[in-house]
Amino acid sequence: MPEKRTIERARKDAREGKAPSTQAGEFVREEMEHIREGKHGARSTKQAIAIGLSKARRAGVKLAAPKKGTTSASTRKKAEQDLKKGKAGAKHKTSTKRSQATKRALKREGRSAASKSALSKQAKSAARRRRARGTTIS
């Protein structure tokens, strides 16, 4: 469950007409804070970002699922599920057993995924991938 201030920040971004990715950035920032505080860990920086994006979609941020071919089919499916959930709102209570199991699994993971160097490395590799995708070899 995202914190109230994170949702408020994302809504403020939406009111200001900012892009959905900017709104979702608030949730990713919150996730990084959680890892740094020691609430839980993450296997990688990518996983931490994915958790934040999932929370954003479920909170109602209109962030589209990744395009076909850019990620695995299961990732796309999960993103579409989250979008659907965000539009519909919570219909039933989350399974306590499942959420506790997820929490326990994340607690076992390391905290280095939210370090400055890990975030920098992730940003640089993402930028490199974007650059490579943008250029065409003729």
Image (cartoon, rainbow, N blue to C red):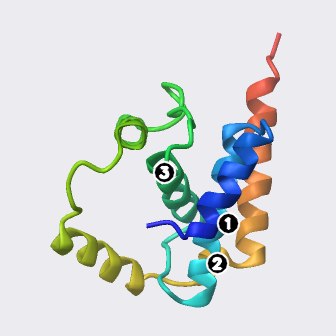
Q: In the rendered structure, which amino acid carries the disc numbered 1?
A: Arg
Report the residue at 53% width, 27% height from top. Answer: 67
- Looking at the image, which is closer to me, 56 or 67? 56
Distance between the alpha carbons at the discs numbered 2 and 1: 6 Å
Disc 2, SS = helix
Q: Are marks 3 and 2 in contact (CB under 8 Å)?
A: no
Residue 33 marker: 2
Pointer 1 residue: 29
Badge nearest the viewer, 3 or 2: 3
- Looking at the image, which is closer to me, 118 or 29? 29
Pointer 3 residue: 59
Badge nearest the viewer, 1 or 3: 3
Q: Residues within 10 Å of mark 3 (few under 14, many from 20)?
A: many
Q: Residues within 10 Å of mark 2 (few under 14, many from 20)?
A: some
Q: Position of residue 53 (x, y in %)?
A: 54, 52
Residue 6 marker: none
Q: Are marks 2 and 1 in contact (CB under 8 Å)?
A: yes
Image quarter hosting the N terminus: bottom left
Q: Position of residue 86 (x, y in %)?
A: 42, 43
Report the residue at 78% width, 39% height from top. Answer: 18
Q: Judge left or right: residue 137 versus residue 10.
A: right
Q: In the rendered structure, which amino acid carries the disc numbered 2?
A: Glu
Q: Going from the N terminus, do you reach mark 3 or mark 2 first?
A: 2
Disc 1, SS = helix
Q: Judge left or right: residue 28 versus residue 78.
A: right
- Looking at the image, which is closer to me, 137 or 14? 14
Q: In the rendered structure, which amino acid carries the disc numbered 3?
A: Ala
Q: Are marks 1 and 3 in contact (CB under 8 Å)?
A: no
Q: Position of residue 12 (x, y in %)?
A: 73, 51
